[in-house]
Image (cartoon, coloured by chain):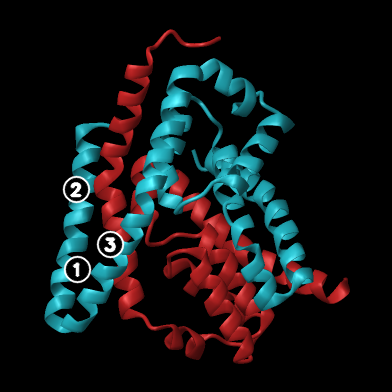
Chain colours: A cyan, B red
Amino acid sequence: MTSEKSYTGWYFLLAVLVAYGVTFIIAPDKVSPALSFAANILGQLVPVFVLIIGVSAVMNYYIKPNSLARYMGKESGARGWIITTVSGILSTGPIYMWYPLLSELKKHGVRDALLANFLYNRAVKIPLMPLLIFYFGVKYAAVLTFVTVFLSFIAGWLTEKILEVTK
Amino acid sequence: MVSARSWKNAVFKAIKSIWNALPVILGVVLLVSLTKAIVPSKTVAGVLSNSMIIGPLIGGALGSILAGNPVTSYVIGGELIKQGVGLVTVTSFLLAWVTVGIVQLPAESILLGKRFALTRNAVAFLLSIVGALMTFVLVNIL
């Protein structure tokens, strides 16, 4: 990441803090619960940060662009799709927590289709399945899971095709 | 082939990657929290429609704008169903909540590229509507 991009991130954070300032003037009662919620999320994110750093470190140590490309790159075939599909389903934490890792994968030559496939499969939340079944029933949960995984392949394929056509 | 890089370098590189993303992650968390505090769940229920055309569009749009833990979307979706909102509308809301991220778009653009982020989110929004219709049909057939 370049220093210019790093500044962009800080500008984004600054803009959000300005939004908090504006909200404090307009609706001061909203700021405290928002900050409390943010603190709660950040508290939950700490172990995810550790996990991400651990996974990234292992990848940095073991995975070379060529070996990664063999599984998830242009010549990856069905195996790459299966790997990203399973990884997306099993991945935990908020979606934005995975952007740095995916950014590294992209730099190592992983296809846009597989990145989009991974991100779409994050819609399948195995730990939350009991809640989904509680509200919507077993049949709905099974159908929604099947449809989500099916559409993840279309999401990956379509995203890559559009990016190629509009290049 | 296994790289010869040391563990120390691998860990340092991983921490640096997270550090570079830290302001964006902090900004997203704060923005998600502010949105959650400002937009009440009842507003979502009031705006959603039962139409097979308008409903999934509104559901998908709201799911795209609102963000947070998916457990929240399941609870909101379940409560919306209880209040009589259509299954297609709620399903597009659930799918878009997780697959589309307007709030996270700046972070995704910075780290994965603007073109990729915009295209992926547009495709995911479209598929949240397609997926909702597919789910509705399959649930009724099976």
Image: A137 above or below A51: below
Q: Which of A60 and A7 is in front in this view?
A: A60
Mark 1 crowdedness (10 Å alpha carbons): few <14, some 14-19, many ≥20: some
Discs 1/3, front: 3
Sequence-wise, which precedes: disc 2 or disc 1?
A: 2
Residue identifier under label 2? A10
Q: Left of A56 or right of it: where is A82?
A: right
Residue identifier under label 1? A19
Three-letter amino acid code at the position of disc 2: Trp
Instruction: Respond whether the residues carrying marks 2 and 3 are from the same subunit.
Output: yes
Mark 3 crowdedness (10 Å alpha carbons): few <14, some 14-19, many ≥20: some
Q: Is mark 3 on a helix, strand or loop?
A: helix
Q: What's the distance in space between the residues labelled 2 and 3, CA to CA?
A: 19 Å
Mark 2 crowdedness (10 Å alpha carbons): few <14, some 14-19, many ≥20: some
Three-letter amino acid code at the position of disc 3: Ala
Residue identifier under label 3? A39
Q: What's the distance in space between the residues labelled 2 and 1, CA to CA?
A: 14 Å
Q: Which of B125 and B1 is in front in this view?
A: B1
Q: What's the distance in space between the residues labelled 1 and 3, CA to CA?
A: 17 Å
Q: What element carries label 2?
A: helix
Image: A4 above or below A48: above
